[in-house]
Every structure is written in C-alpha cells, then in structure tokens.
C-alpha cells in the first residue's frame, strides 16, 4: 500500500534528538513508509530572531500563559517546512517526532488522500477535537469539521498551495501554532480531521515545548487570564458563523 501512496512525508525533529529520531524511524519502518527529517528550530540559539517574530504581550493575552522558547521553535519549524513544500504539486504529510501510529493508519491515510478535494488540511491526530460535524463518510471513516477547539499537530496532511498561503500569513506569532490553525475562520482554510484518529503524540511527559511534565508551562494569574477565556468563548462563535456561512453547519447537521 505504501508504494501506491506517492506521498512526500516530512518529520520535524531537532538534529540532536537522537532517541526521538530512532524511535520515529522504527515507527515508519513498521509501516513500510519512507520519510525525510526536517530539522526543527533550536529556539535557544535563535532566541532574538524568534522573539522579533513574536508579539509576547498578545501571546500572553491570547494563551493565558507565558511564552516559551519551545513554543516559538515549534511554531517556526512548521512555518519553515510549509515554505519548503509550497512548490510541490501534491499533498504532503507532516509529522512531529513524537508521533505514534495506530494499526489502521495506512488505511486512514489512503482514505484521507482519496478525499483530498474536500480539505485544505486534514489532521490524522489530535490533542482536542470538540464538536465534530461530519461532511463526508468513506467506509469506516468520517471527515469532520469542528465547531469547538481542534488542536494538535503531530500528524497532518496539507496541500502545498495552502502551505504557501499560510506561511505568508502566520507572523507575527500571537498564540500556539495549532491554536492559530484553529482560526480557520481568519485564514479561510478548510481545516478537517479524519476520524477515528489514527495517530497520536506520545512524549511520555518530556516535551521540547512544555518541558518535563509541563514544568515550562506558567499560567498567568486567574484574573489576568480573563482575556484568554473571553477569546475562547468568542472563537466558538466565530467558528460557528464561518461554518454556517460556508454551508458546513445546516439545520440538518448533527
């Protein structure tokens, strides 16, 4: 099956993440899939450059937490990879190096590619996926939009023209990368997920973004998080309106 996919696959990984690279190589090898590593961004060595691309005050207001170098590095790695693949003429699979595949991953990938005219980005993994709205079914799989929060970038398909468009509109950095993608109503993209999700991030509590068991996560005081909560609420409304205007949500939608 893998030889028939005719798919370029990239895995974002820091050059010195040897254990992660070895593990993800085994993961892909078990499926007979070939991929290329794309070097992640070493945020600590590029601190000033990354901060120049970020609005720290707006980040804290949007996210309700302090900005970390890990978040910036992850964000820019995806944007840099989008620029690299923007000249291709077929969908690209992008993964992070903590991805783990389920036994039906190849089948899910094949179904997602079959439905490629129905999406701009199709996530095969998630951290959260609230409020699914099914727009297409193919055998045991459902292609969904989401009116609630839909986050996680461990494994997703993207069309090169969409990658090019987004790489030009994703700066300055004002929130986490997957949260920015969830603002599909701003970017005008068809952000979907294929369920059941067939991949997931497994970092065993050790993340380059949030640290060892989230010890790099420093939330603001509850009162200072008020703008964050208001934004979360307003995003529900904005997602709903975009989905309704684009005919995704109808009276007959579940």
Image (spheres, rainbow, N blue to C red):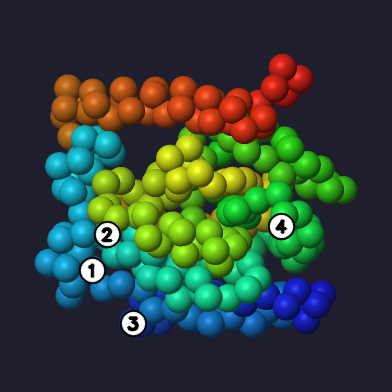
Determine the secondary structure under disc 3.
loop
Q: Which dot, 4 or 3, sits closer to the camera?
A: 4
- Badge 4 vs badge 2, beta-carbon distance below 8 Å: no
- How many neighbours does mark 3 have within 10 angstroms: few (below 14), some (14-19), or many (20 or more)? few
Task: Name the image quarter holding residue 225.
Answer: top left
Q: Earlier in the sequence, mark 1 or mark 4?
A: 1
In space, the residues marked 4 and 2 are separated at their CA atoms by 30 Å
Q: Which residue is mark 3?
A: 16
SS assignment at label 1 = loop
| Picture quadrant of residue 49 | bottom left
Q: Nearer the viewer, mark 1 or mark 4?
A: 4
Residue occupying image coordinates x 62% and y 38%: 145
Are the two marked residues, 1 and 4, in contact with CB atoms closer than 8 angstroms? no
Q: Identify the residue under disc 4.
A: 116
Which of the two labelled residues, at mark 4 and mark 2, occupies the earlier sequence position? 2
Q: Earlier in the sequence, mark 3 or mark 1?
A: 3
Q: CA distance from mark 4 to mark 3?
A: 34 Å
The quarter in which the C terminus is drawn is top right
Pick whichever of labels 2 and 3 is earlier in the sequence. 3
Q: Of all residues shown, which one is farthest toward the right?
A: 139
Q: Are marks 2 and 1 in contact (CB under 8 Å)?
A: yes
Whole-Å distance between the Cαs marked 1 and 4? Answer: 34 Å
Residue 28 % position (x, y): 63, 76
Q: Is residue 14 visible?
A: yes
Residue at the outermost top position: 251
Q: Earlier in the sequence, mark 4 or mark 3?
A: 3
Q: Which mark is residue 60?
A: none
Question: Along the polypeptide, which appears first: circle 2 or circle 1?
Answer: 1
The residue at 25%/53% (across/down) is 172
Question: Label for residue 43?
Answer: 1
Residue ID for mark 2: 72
């Amino acid at each position: 099956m893998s030889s028939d996919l005719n798919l370029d696959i990239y895995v974002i990984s820091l050059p010195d993440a040897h254990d992660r690279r070895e593990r993800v190589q085994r993961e892909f090898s078990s499926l007979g899939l070939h991929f290329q590593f794309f070097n992640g961004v070493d945020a600590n060595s590029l601190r000033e450059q990354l901060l120049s691309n970020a609005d720290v005050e707006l980040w804290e207001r949007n996210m309700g937490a302090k900005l970390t170098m890990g978040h910036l590095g992850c964000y820019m790695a995806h944007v840099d990879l989008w620029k690299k693949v923007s000249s291709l003429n077929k969908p690209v699979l992008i993964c992070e190096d903590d991805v783990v595949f389920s036994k039906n991953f190849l089948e899910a990938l094949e179904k997602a590619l079959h439905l490629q005219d129905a999406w701009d980005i199709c996530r095969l993994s998630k951290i959260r996926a609230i409020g699914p709205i099914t727009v297409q079914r193919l055998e045991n799989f459902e292609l969904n939009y989401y009116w609630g929060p839909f986050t996680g970038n461990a494994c997703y398909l993207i069309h090169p023209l969409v990658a090019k468009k987004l790489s030009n509109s994703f700066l300055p950095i004002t929130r986490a990368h997957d949260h920015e993608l969830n603002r599909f109503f701003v970017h005008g993209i068809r952000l979907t997920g294929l369920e059941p999700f067939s991949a997931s991030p497994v970092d065993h509590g050790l993340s380059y973004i949030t640290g060892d068991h989230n010890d790099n996560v420093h939330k603001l005081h509850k009162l200072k998080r008020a703008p964050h909560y208001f934004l979360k609420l307003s995003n529900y409304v904005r997602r709903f309106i975009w989905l309704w205007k684009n005919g995704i949500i109808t009276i007959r939608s579940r």
